[in-house]
Image (cartoon, grey):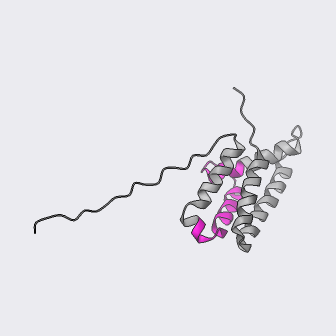
Amino acid sequence: MAKIRFNDKLFKGHLDEWVQEVSDDDFTRAWEIVVGCLGIHAKMDRQPEQSSQQAKREAYEDFALAFEGEASTFTMVGMLHEFDQMCPDTFREDGTFEAKMNEAIAKARGDVYKAPAPPPVFTILEGGKE
């Protein structure tokens, strides 16, 4: 079976939309830096037989793999860390950042992201002798 190419445009578009929706200057700046650096990364790593689009796809896929904990360059890890840290706390703490990244990766791979089920809610019952 042929491997589906990572669709950097869907990945970027999904995150562009979310970053714009969040509307936080530091977070927007961090994303724009990531996008710019991925373009430079693709340009610098492009092989002679590669198209610029293929090199760009690979750069975006490397960024996604860094998010998933795969071996990555310090550049990818640093960009991911900066993007994560500039995300407003509420979106990191409630899992939105992770979910949006997973959604973008799934879209780029032609998959559908299924968010994990929320943890069960436990009720503490009081009991004992009266």
The part of the image, by quadrant, that contains residue 127 is bottom left
Magenta segment includes 42: no
**Front residue (pair 25, 36):** 25
Relative to 36, say whether 102 is above or below.
above
Report the residue at 63% width, 48% height from top: 71
Q: Is residue 64 magenta?
A: yes
Where in the figure is residue 92, as x and y percent of width and height? Answer: 58, 65
Please say whether residue 72 is visible from this viewpoint: no
- Residue 124 in which image quadrant: bottom left
In the figure, is residue 7 to the left or right of 44? left
Q: Farthest bottom residue? A: 25
Quadrant where the C terminus sits is bottom left
Instruction: Return the x and y of residue 57 as percentages of the image width and height.
Output: 79, 45
**Residue at (83, 55) in percent of width and height:** 39
Count of residue discs: 0
Residue 41 is left or right of residue 124, and the answer is right
Q: Nearer the viewer, residue 104 or 122?
A: 122
Q: Is residue 41 above or below residue 48?
A: below
Task: Tell me: residue 92, above or below residue 46.
Answer: below
Q: Position of residue 27 (x, y in %)?
A: 71, 69
- Direction from residue 12 to residue 71 in the image, left or right: left
Q: Out of 36 and 98, give the one closest to the viewer.
A: 98
Residue 9 visible in the shown view: yes
Kindly identify the residue that appears in the image at 65 percent across and 63 percent down.
Answer: 81
Query: Where residue 106 appears, x then y in whole percent?
Result: 66, 45
Query: Magenta stretch mostly in which secondary structure?
Result: helix
Query: Which portion, as a residue range, is magenta?
Result: 62-91
The residue positioned 79% from the left and 49% from the top of the image is 9
